[in-house]
Image (cartoon, rainbow, N blue to C red):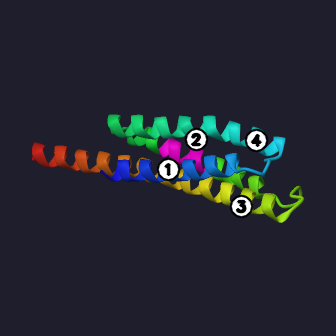
Amino acid sequence: MQASSNLERIADHAHRIAHIASQNGFRLPEELKEELSRMDSLLCSLIEDSVNYLVQTNSGKANELIDRIREVKSRIGGLSNSSQSRDGSELLARLVLAGSMERMLDYIMNISELTINLSHAMNSNERAAQL
């Protein structure tokens, strides 16, 4: 249930990003569209991995995924770079997009942390059963 709640929140942010990208009367710069496309593939891969590791209860891979997420988060800041923004609406769009992506990464990290906690709980139960 906790994982599904995080997945629902990820979907909410994906909807927000899609809404911004398709707003009438506002055109995203090509460079921002390209970055969003790259991030789309990456986020989908991270989500898929987080769910797979949860199902497998693979805490080692979940820890590796958390490290990958931290690396990606460090690149998100460039999305909201205001030095290239020509107007306030573009800057606002960039800030909202970067914030939503950062939150999505947080939710993926939550699923990975859930995997680690579940794995530790299962290992503790196995040890207790052996005693």
Q: CA distance from mark 2 to mark 1?
A: 10 Å
Q: State which region is magenta.
A: 63-71
Q: Earlier in the sequence, mark 2 or mark 1?
A: 1
Q: Secondary structure at mark 4?
A: helix
Residue 10: numbered disc:
1
Vertical position of residue 34 compared to residue 108: above or below:
above
Q: Is there a contact, CB below 8 Å, between mark 3 and mark 4? A: no
- Among all residues in the image, which is located at the extreme front? 24
Q: Callout 3, which amino acid?
A: Leu
Direction from residue 36 to residue 69 in the image, left or right: left
Number of dots carrying numbers? 4
Q: Earlier in the sequence, mark 3 or mark 1?
A: 1
Image coordinates of residue 31 in percent, x first then y, are 82, 42
Image coordinates of residue 9 in percent, x first then y, are 46, 54
Q: Callout 1, which amino acid?
A: Ile
Q: Which residue is mark 4?
A: 33
Q: CA distance from mark 3 to mark 4?
A: 14 Å
Q: Secondary structure at mark 2?
A: helix
Q: Callout 2, which amino acid?
A: Leu
Q: Tell which tag, 4 or 2, sits nearer the viewer.
A: 4
Residue 43: numbered disc:
2
Direction from residue 6 to residue 73 in the image, left or right: right
Q: Callout 4, which amino acid?
A: Lys
Q: Which residue is mark 3?
A: 95
